[in-house]
Image (tube, helix red, strand yellow):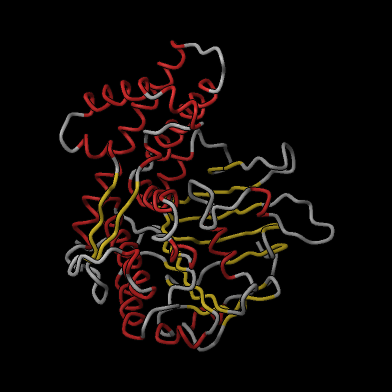
Amino acid sequence: MKIAPSLRLVRLHLTEFRNYETLSWRPASRISVLFGPNGSGKTNLLEAISLLTPGRGLRNARTADLARRAPGASGRWAVAARFDTPDGPAEIGTGIPPEGPADRRVFRLDGAAPRSQAEIAARVAAVWLTPQMERLFIEPPSGRRRFLDRLVWALEPGHAREIAAHDAAMSGRNRLLAQASRDTGWLAGLEDAMARHAVAATAARMALVSRLDGAVTAGAVVGFPPVRIALDCPIATRLAAAPAVEVEEWLRRELAARRRGDAEAGTASLGAHRCDMALTEATTGLPAGLASTGEQKAMLLAVILGHAGLIAEARCFAPLLLLDEPCVHLDPARRQAMYAALVRLPGQALLTGTDAETFLPLAETAEGLRTGDGRLTPDPRFFPASATFSPVPGTP
């Protein structure tokens, strides 16, 4: 069944964001390539779009670090966009409003505050690849867990709510354990919440891994290595062999038994935050952490492209693909395979790089825009529609 390409970024508007004082952009093609020297604002555009989905964006940046740094800058920033979605047009915005605390970011959905970020996730989805993710398999598990959770909530918008509820209950438990006098009833309530949300979050992770593993283990993404995905998680191990209610009860008992040790450590030794993700090359069994940089990049791209196809089938729209410097470390054959996959996928894709020449194989399909001086300038060698784009900062 052919999936209709029904999610589109129609307009993006930035105000006092990173190096942009103000910018309005209407993408002219399903694939956009942004090129320019380092520091010219390519990644900033991808980051702005990523902030219109749940979480802290592709850089995981603090809210205060997103404002433009220049004399006279207000320190308050905004990102707003119009999307065409399967449910009709959607206006989504985020930033620090003129009123209120300068470090508190808010969301707006069609002009109103959403009840939760799950409402945003239900309307739009995005997945991304950044150069920082090339270190995913030599860094602590937290980065791999964040990567996994972004994949999950692009498919299951309610997952973000489960993770947030688990972490809130865990923080409350940590604070209570640090007190000399503890309310055991309150502790039990927090541990009950941790158990319920941890099991729900873990079940969602397991479902995603199972579906995605089937999509990429057989090498479904042509030109990329077959990949096997697995969870390293004691809760997932239990859930594979027992009903969720039994696992919740086990987790409640374990949390109660570990109170003294967790109080000394200052954190919970068991929960949804202890999950890790393992990635291996399916044919050779080589763990991603032992693979070359180029192979790691290819394995990650296989996962992201396979995931995009999975979302397209499950939600009847493909997610936005934000690929920051995707060609670095890829050999020519893999670059061509990536370009071919992007042309086949129905989703909108945005790619960055330093040189326009890298993307010329996409010239008949993509628009090409040079970044710099807070502007976007069309390159006439690319998709003719880009020639009609007027890169005037501040144009609504």
Q: How many marks?
A: 0
Relative side of 247 to 295, left or right: left
In the image shown, does 288 or 264 lie closer to the viewer? Answer: 264
Query: Residue 307: where, in percent of width, then height?
Result: 30, 58
Single out the residue that lies furthest toward the right: 72
- Quadrant in the picture for residue 163: top left
Query: Residue 115: where, in percent of width, then height?
Result: 50, 33
Query: Residue 250: where, in percent of width, then height?
Result: 26, 24
The residue at the point 32 percent across, 60 percent down is 308
Query: Residue 142: where, in percent of width, then height?
Result: 44, 48
- Quadrant in the picture for residue 234: top left
The residue at the point 51 percent across, 57 percent down is 58
Relative side of 133 to 284, left or right: right
In the image shown, does 392 or 375 lie closer to the viewer? Answer: 375
In the image shown, does 317 or 254 lie closer to the viewer? Answer: 254
In the image shown, does 303 or 113 lie closer to the viewer? Answer: 303
Relative side of 322 to 104, left or right: left
Image quadrant where one finds the C terminus = bottom right
Relative side of 370 to 339, left or right: right
The residue at the point 44 percent across, 52 percent down is 140
The residue at the point 28 percent across, 36 percent down is 235
- Quadrant in the picture for residue 339: bottom left
